[in-house]
């Protein structure tokens, strides 16, 4: 058994920020299932929404967030995160993060702010079109030499350990976790009084996604199995513009392209967003994604097009170098031709239910970043609010955990992992088949547009799949693939169960059987908790 003051699962912006702060007061282990640089954060292109301009205000940012959230945001949480954002950004800059700047008329320098859908002002801090990568690099450099931080790469969390599971007659608390060392295949036991889930999202639960392969809903699934409350998983955000190309895998075309004047057109070059929203291409993501989906169904085409070729070529190459080079390598010169795009699963607005300090309903367990449901996003996330939330909540979670200490009243020794009589997985084809089936049924039945019948079919099949997967779990030696499949199936079922509980259309949850809002019954969060 290894003991730490804090164990952080995940190495994106939220996990690294928490670890860096906690290491000033105690020992920290960062558990990450691939390399430390593999995270959703590293894939984030657009930037961080934060009030830094005299033309902007906290009140406007709060208003824009509430409008996008379609009635379900917690206004106090929104105001806290937006208000504390500038201070957290300043800390990031102090660590060495360089956001793009521009010259002022007076000869000085100021942030080169971008604008994205749903924002009434330019407020997006960015580093070209690779903001997340630069933030990840900055934070990894900061933790690299810290003596109190141990990074456990290629280690995958298996399950949380609670006092309830151990049989203690006391308030149920998270007191550690089991972790698979992928190199040796052995399971290690980590003892801690503060466990922080910073595992990111679950985009891989869908067939088409902008997310990396690691986004399999691990944190939500583990928290659910441990008994923590899960909230609002029906609100899965589909990014409107993922590159549509047979050789491109999960490549996002950032919303900033539309913020800088990019327009959506059909195959004949006709603009169509005016039919759906007066804000055109800068409407919130749920509206734009549904509009594209409707146009594709109306025309029978496989994609629509995002055109920014009317802007100066030098500007496009300078502002979007990563997108320009990637598309150019696929034979698409975005300075001259439109980009074929389709919606794809992007961001979970629900997750493990927490308060403003990242505390879950299970003592000693915190959740930060995309895996958490804090109340900021409501029914639809405002573009580029996610990285801001990660910074603010990680800061607040560490401060609260360090104040509480969460020390157990009695000495607790955790049992070693007991693998039992297992055999190596020799039927990997079954695992891969189940993985593929989950992602396809989620795309077909639980996508941008839903119906009760589709959701019920998905729920029935997922129930059967979970039974099959659980049999694999108990009868074979565990592997990372099997653990991810198990988490994927659990997370998919939570999305479906939440969707079935909401008999209305709101934000990202759009169902043909219940069009429009029903504030009398559903102006509330959807909360699930394992009995």
Image: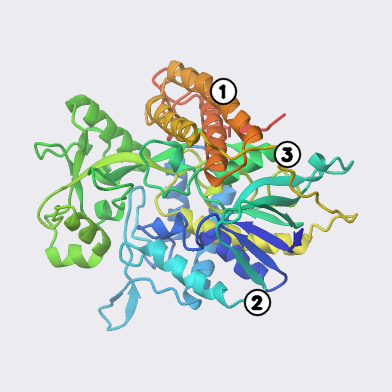
How many numbered circles are shown?
Answer: 3
Q: What residue is at 46 percent from the left and 41 percent from the top?
A: 69
Q: Are marks 3 and 1 in contact (CB under 8 Å)?
A: no
Can you identify the residue that label 2 sits on? 147
Q: Nearer the viewer, mark 3 or mark 1?
A: 3
Report which residue position mark 1 lands on: 463
Q: Residue at x 50, y 24 (%)?
A: 518
> Which quadrant would residue 303 be assigned to in this image?
top left
Badge 2 density bin: few <14, some 14–19, many ≥20, Cα 10 Å: few
Is 499 positioned to the left or the right of 265 in the image?
A: right
Q: Position of residue 388 (x, y in %)?
A: 49, 59
Q: How far is the residue under mark 3 from the one under mark 1?
A: 25 Å
Between 269 and 456, the one nearer to me in the picture? 456
Name the residue beneath numbered marker 3.
Answer: 420
Per the image, label 1 sits on a secondary structure element best described as helix
Q: Earlier in the sequence, mark 3 or mark 2?
A: 2
Q: CB of mark 2 within 8 Å of CB of mark 1?
A: no
Q: Quadrant of the N terminus?
A: bottom right
Between 408 and 435, the one nearer to me in the picture? 435
State which quarter of the image contains the C terminus.
Answer: top right
């Amino acid at each position: 058994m290894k003991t730490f003051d804090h164990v952080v699962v995940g190495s994106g912006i939220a996990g690294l920020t928490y670890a860096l702060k906690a290491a000033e007061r105690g020992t920290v282990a960062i558990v990450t299932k691939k390399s430390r640089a593999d995270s959703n954060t590293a894939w984030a292109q657009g930037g961080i929404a934060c009030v830094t301009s005299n033309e902007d205000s906290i009140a406007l940012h709060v208003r824009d967030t509430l409008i996008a959230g379609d009635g379900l945001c917690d206004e106090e949480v929104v105001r806290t995160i937006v208000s504390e954002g500038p201070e957290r950004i300043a800390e990031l800059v102090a660590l060495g993060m360089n956001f793009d700047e521009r010259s002022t008329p007076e000869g000085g320098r100021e942030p080169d702010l971008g604008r994205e859908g749903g924002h009434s002002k330019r407020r997006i801090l960015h580093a070209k079109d690779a903001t997340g990568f630069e933030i990840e690099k900055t934070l990894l450099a900061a933790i690299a030499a810290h003596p109190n931080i141990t990074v456990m790469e290629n280690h995958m969390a298996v399950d949380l350990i609670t006092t309830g599971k151990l049989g203690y007659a006391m308030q149920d608390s998270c007191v550690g976790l089991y972790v698979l060392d992928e190199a040796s295949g052995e399971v290690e036991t980590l003892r801690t009084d503060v466990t922080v889930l910073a595992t990111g999202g679950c985009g891989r639960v869908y067939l088409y996604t902008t997310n990396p392969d690691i986004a399999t809903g691990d944190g939500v699934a583990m928290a659910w199995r441990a008994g923590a409350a899960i909230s609002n998983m029906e609100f899965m955000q589909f990014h409107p513009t993922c590159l549509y190309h047979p050789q491109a895998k999960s490549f996002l075309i950032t919303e900033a392209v539309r913020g800088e004047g990019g327009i959506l057109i059909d195959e004949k070059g006709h603009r169509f967003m005016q039919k759906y929203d007066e804000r055109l291409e800068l409407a919130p993501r749920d509206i734009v994604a549904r509009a594209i989906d409707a146009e594709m169904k109306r025309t029978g085409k496989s994609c629509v097009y995002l055109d920014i070729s009317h802007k100066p070529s030098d500007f496009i190459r300078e502002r979007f170098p990563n997108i320009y080079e990637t598309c150019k390598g696929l034979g698409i010169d975005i300075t001259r031709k439109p980009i074929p795009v389709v919606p794809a699963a992007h961001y979970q607005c629900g997750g493990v239910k927490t308060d403003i300090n990242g505390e879950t309903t299970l003592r000693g367990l915190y959740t930060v970043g995309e895996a958490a449901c804090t109340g900021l996003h409501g029914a639809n996330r405002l573009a580029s609010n996610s990285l801001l939330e990660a910074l603010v909540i990680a800061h607040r979670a560490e401060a609260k955990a360090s104040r509480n200490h969460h020390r157990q009243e009695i000495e607790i020794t955790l049992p070693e992992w007991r693998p039992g009589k297992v055999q190596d997985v020799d039927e990997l084809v079954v695992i891969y088949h189940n993985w593929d089936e989950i992602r396809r049924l989620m795309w077909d039945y639980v996508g941008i547009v839903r119906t009760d019948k589709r959701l019920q079919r998905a729920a029935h099949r997922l129930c059967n799949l979970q039974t099959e997967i659980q049999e694999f779990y108990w009868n074979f030696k565990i592997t990372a693939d099997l653990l991810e499949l198990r988490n994927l199936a659990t997370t998919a079922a939570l999305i479906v169960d939440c969707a079935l509980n909401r008999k209305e259309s709101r934000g990202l949850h759009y169902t043909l059987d219940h069009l429009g809002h029903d504030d009398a019954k559903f102006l509330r969060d959807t909360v699930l908790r394992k009995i």
